[in-house]
Structures are given as structure tokens and as C-alpha cells.
Image: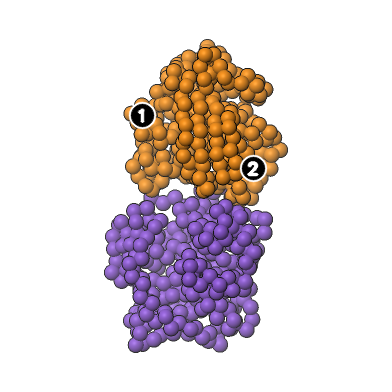
Chain colours: A orange, B purple
């Protein structure tokens, strides 16, 4: 059994009101792997990087049970690069640079060793690439989770709708849920989106937590009120990683386990935003996670 | 022992994307009383109305254990009138008309029969009026809850800060908490505001629920995700009414009871928004409240 994570491995340059970084490791698959590996190993990564991607970053993830057989290294190419600047409210950001580089030629080929996949996490990527990974699997995984963003709704809506028919859980934020459904009410939006394929829908609301929809049931997870959000980059990927990592660990896809998965995703995201990039995720311990889980219980219980 | 409710009793004309009303009963004290009376009676109302205020509305509230000895009736005057139009998102609204009418001369004189007050709910009003009620009470109530809004921060900040020193629980929304504290982070805002006087702070976040702050503890209450918000008018007052009504019923001001009070406020607010004005509050039953409380438990538990 294994957990496959598909997504970008990249470099980011980030400016926040608290400081800036020149070039720091990032990418959806990087954050997902750092987060999920706290709960489940092995993780089989699917991505593409250039010759500039540091071996050290791979080694650190390898120590966390991440395998790179499915990661294509284009020696003569450069890794995907994104640069952005966050506004004071930390909820909005301007993209300064998007250099696709090797990502433009990403056409993943799943190694044979990846065919034991039970849990598939499709990180934010072109929907056609996400679909290609699903179709390469000879046996359908127990659970397919897909993360996407408004960008793909703008330029690849048909491909997105196509892959939505093949998945179990969709993860989007509130604005994206409204855009995809054309409904303002999130309850109505959830009905429309679940009609597109995914049985489960998670709507992330940033500092307001997340909602999980399944049949007539709704679960509302709080976000931990934080004094400071240092850098929100990767928080959504980290959330998804905590979610699928916890579910893979439990090897159970009931609504109850998914609820706890949403909480674990929120726990991990609350650590992610505390430092630049995935820095805090690299040092988080089991004790940290348990302590924060307790904080969430105290926060939500009545 | 009694619960005193101070605030406006008024008429509103409301436009929402779902319809409009010409003239419908409203006012902060009206909503608080309808909501709180589900949990606790007698309620001793403090307000001012004109000769146009319908006796029938008073009679309906009297049937719910609301006494009007502290309500001044200015026969030759007109009741406070507000008219507003909600935008499609239901979170923003334009005020079309504000006719203060008799409210301009509101200078409440507490009847002697109100001196047994244990719980005091100061609905949204001029801070100086709120303060005058506190100072007229010979014995300090067990709990003083104050609701206010950005309008008073704009035009009467010093008076507001003055009365904040005298109360236990402040209820504001997130934008108002940021304005009052000058801090964007709600955790930081809560520290600043609690430094102004109130030991407890409730920050309402509309469709995102509410946060309760006390010492180092935080409680996050979800809002019930609703398919349709028909009319948000009075939802905040209704929340405050459910909160203080529940606490007065329990006659306990521990953090645990306050948490449940925040949930009860949310339960009542979820009914308030379902019809125009306080219409739905007039028909809500104990069974309705219990059923929705169960929905909140299922929504938040993990």
C-alpha cells in the first residue's frame, strides 16, 4: 500500500509584511509530502524538477519516507519558479513572477512500483496532468483527493470538470467553490459541485477554518486563531497533506475519519504559516502535533 | 432576580434580494427580548417608542414575560425608523433612511422595580445612554453585556471607552474589533480590547461563526451553513439575546456556560435570518431550538 502525491516541486521568492526570501524551496507536492509524512510513509512523489533542484532538499524528504522514482529530473532545465507578494491582510497576494520552466513539459509516467497506490493526492496542477495520473493506475485507489485553484477554472474548466468525475474528494477555497458552482451560498455551491463528481467536498476558508460536505452532513472545522501569520505560502497544500496523510494512516474513508483528517490538515497548516516556506514543517514533532490537536479540541468543544 | 434589556424598539423597512417590507417591527431590544425570552423570564425592557408603536407588538412580548415599565411612550412622537437595502452577498448593506425621532430624546429612567437586576444586556445604543443605565443600578449586576457598532466608534469613541471599563462582556463583529483595537489579527485585537475593560470578548464573524476570548482561552463557535439567508436584520441582537438569556437561565457566568451561550446565540440567529424581521423568532419553539442545537453539535464535534 502507498500514498502517491502528485504536484510541483519548485522554488519560490516570497515577500510578506514581515520580511522576504530570495529563493526558497516550495511547490504543492513539497508541502504535501512534508505534511503527510508525519502520519504516513512511504510517500511516492510524482513531479518534475530542473537540474537546479538541490539534492539536499530531496535527501531531507527521503529521510521522511518520500520516494522520488516518479520525479523527473531535467538536468538541462530549471525548476518551476514563483514569486509573490502578500498584502497586509495576508489573504490577498500579487503574483510577481511565474516561470513554468520544466513544468511546461510535465507529462508524468508512473513507475511500475507506484501501482500499489491506495491513496492518491493530486496537488494543484493542470487538470489534464492530474487526469493522466489517474488513468495510468491499473487499480483504482481507495481514495482520490484533488486540489485545484481558480486559475484552472479560468483557463481549463472543461478539463477540470472532466477530472472531477473521477475523484472522491475535492479541496478548494470559498471563492473557488463559488466560481466553480456559480452559487454564492456555500451550501448550494456544495450541492452543485458534488453533482459534478466528488462525493466529498472540502471548502477552505483561511482564517475561518474549513467545511467538509458529504451527503446531507456538514462538518465545520475551526482555524486556530493565530497572533501572527508569518507566511501563508503552502498552507493549502499543507492542509491537504495532513488530511490525506491522516486518512492513509487510519486506512479508513468514513466521514468520521475525514472530519479528523480536516482537523489534522488544519493543525499542520497552523504550523506551516509560522515561518517562511516549509521551514517550520521540517522541524515539527509528534509532540507539537499532539499539543496543537488538543488546542483544537479545546477551541471547538462545547 | 431579573434580566434587563436596554435598546431600541423601532420600525424598519428592509430590502433584500428576496423581497422587501414596507414597515416592520424591529430595534435591538425587540430582537434581544424575543430571543432571550426563550431561555429566561421575566425580562425588563428599557427603551423609548412613539405613539405609533403598536400595542399588539408589546402584547406579544408581554406574553413572553417582557415587562414595559421602563419603556417610555412619547404619545406625540414617532418611533425610531431605519431603512436599508442588503447587497447580494447579504454581508453588506446601504442605509437608506435613519429617522431618530423619539430616540433623539432617550434618557432612560430605571423604575424601582428594575433594581433587582442580575443580568444586564446593553443593546446597541449611544454609549452615554448605556452608561447611564449602569450608573442608575444601586447594586452591580452579576454580568453586564454590551453590544455596540462601528458607528459609535466613529462618533463617540471616548464615551464608548468610558463605558467599556464598566462591563464584563463586549460583543462586536470582526471589522469593529479591528477598528476598536487598531490590530488586524483578531488574537491581538482581543488582547487590546480586553485591556480596555471587558474580561470577555465575543467577536461575531457572520457566516463564519463567532469567537469567545477569556484570559488565554479561545472558543470558536461555527455558524450553521445555511442555504439561504433571507434577511440578516437583527441577527446580531438575536445572537446577544440567546447568549444572555441562556446565561441568565443557568445563572452561571463560567467560561463553560459562556461557550454554550455563544452556541445558543448562534442557534437563535440561525432562525432569525430565515424570515423578515423577527417573524421567525415569534414562532420558534423549544423543540426547534433543541433540534438546531443538535445540528450545531454534529457540525462542530470531532
Task: Confirm whether circles 2 and 1 share one chain.
Answer: yes
Q: Name the residue under label 2.
A: A293
Tag shown at residue A75 = none
Chain at tag 2:
A
Q: Is residue B135 left or right of residue A188?
A: right
Do we see residue B275 in this rendering?
Answer: no
Do we see residue A100 in this rendering?
Answer: yes
Q: Nearer the viewer, residue B225 or B217?
A: B217
CA gap, disc 2 and disc 1:
37 Å
Chain at tag 1:
A
Q: Nearer the viewer, residue B280 or B6?
A: B6
Tag shown at residue A156 = 1
Q: Is residue B56 left or right of residue A121?
A: left
In percent of width and height, residue B203 lies at 54, 59
The N terminus of chain A lies in quadrant: top right
Q: Is residue B293 left or right of residue B80?
A: right
Q: Nearer the viewer, residue A96 or A141?
A: A96
In percent of width and height, residue B279 lies at 37, 66
> Where B241 sits versus B206, above or below?
below
In percent of width and height, residue A195 lies at 36, 36
Which residue does the image show at 65% across and 36% down from the upper left?
Answer: A280
In percent of width and height, residue B201 lies at 59, 62
Circle 1 packing at 10 Å, graded few (<14), some (14-19), many (20+), is: some
Furthest residue toward right: A287
SS for callout 1: loop
Amino acid at each position: 500500500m502507498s500514498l502517491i502525491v502528485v504536484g510541483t516541486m519548485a522554488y519560490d521568492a516570497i515577500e510578506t509584511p514581515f520580511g522576504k526570501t530570495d529563493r526558497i524551496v516550495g511547490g504543492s507536492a513539497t508541502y504535501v509530502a512534508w505534511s503527510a509524512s508525519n502520519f504516513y510513509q512511504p510517500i511516492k512523489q510524482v513531479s518534475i524538477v530542473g537540474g537546479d533542484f538541490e539534492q539536499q532538499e530531496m535527501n531531507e524528504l527521503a529521510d521522511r519516507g518520500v520516494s522520488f522514482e516518479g520525479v523527473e529530473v531535467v538536468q538541462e532545465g530549471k525548476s518551476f519558479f514563483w514569486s509573490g507578494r502578500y498584502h497586509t491582510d495576508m489573504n490577498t497576494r500579487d503574483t510577481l513572477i511565474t516561470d513554468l520552466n520544466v513544468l511546461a513539459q510535465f507529462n508524468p509516467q508512473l513507475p511500475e512500483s507506484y501501482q500499489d497506490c491506495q491513496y492518491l493526492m493530486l496537488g494543484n496542477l493542470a487538470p489534464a496532468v492530474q487526469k493522466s495520473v489517474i488513468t495510468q493506475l491499473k487499480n483504482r485507489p481507495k481514495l482520490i483527493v484533488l486540489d485545484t485553484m481558480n486559475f484552472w477554472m479560468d483557463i481549463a474548466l472543461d478539463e477540470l470538470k472532466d477530472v472531477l468525475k473521477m475523484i472522491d474528494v475535492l479541496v478548494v477555497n470559498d471563492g473557488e467553490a463559488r466560481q466553480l458552482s456559480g452559487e454564492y451560498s456555500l451550501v448550494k455551491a456544495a450541492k452543485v459541485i458534488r453533482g459534478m463528481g466528488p462525493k466529498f467536498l472540502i471548502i477552505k476558508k483561511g482564517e475561518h477554518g474549513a467545511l467538509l460536505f458529504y451527503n446531507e452532513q456538514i462538518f465545520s472545522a475551526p482555524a486556530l486563531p493565530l497572533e501572527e501569520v508569518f507566511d501563508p505560502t503552502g498552507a493549502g497544500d499543507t492542509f491537504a497533506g495532513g488530511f490525506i496523510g491522516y486518512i492513509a494512516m487510519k486506512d479508513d474513508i468514513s466521514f468520521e475519519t475525514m472530519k479528523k483528517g480536516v482537523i489534522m490538515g488544519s493543525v499542520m497548516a497552523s504550523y506551516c504559516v509560522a515561518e517562511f516556506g516549509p521551514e517550520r514543517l521540517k522541524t515539527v514533532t509528534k509532540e507539537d502535533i499532539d499539543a496543537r490537536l488538543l488546542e483544537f479540541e479545546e477551541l471547538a468543544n462545547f
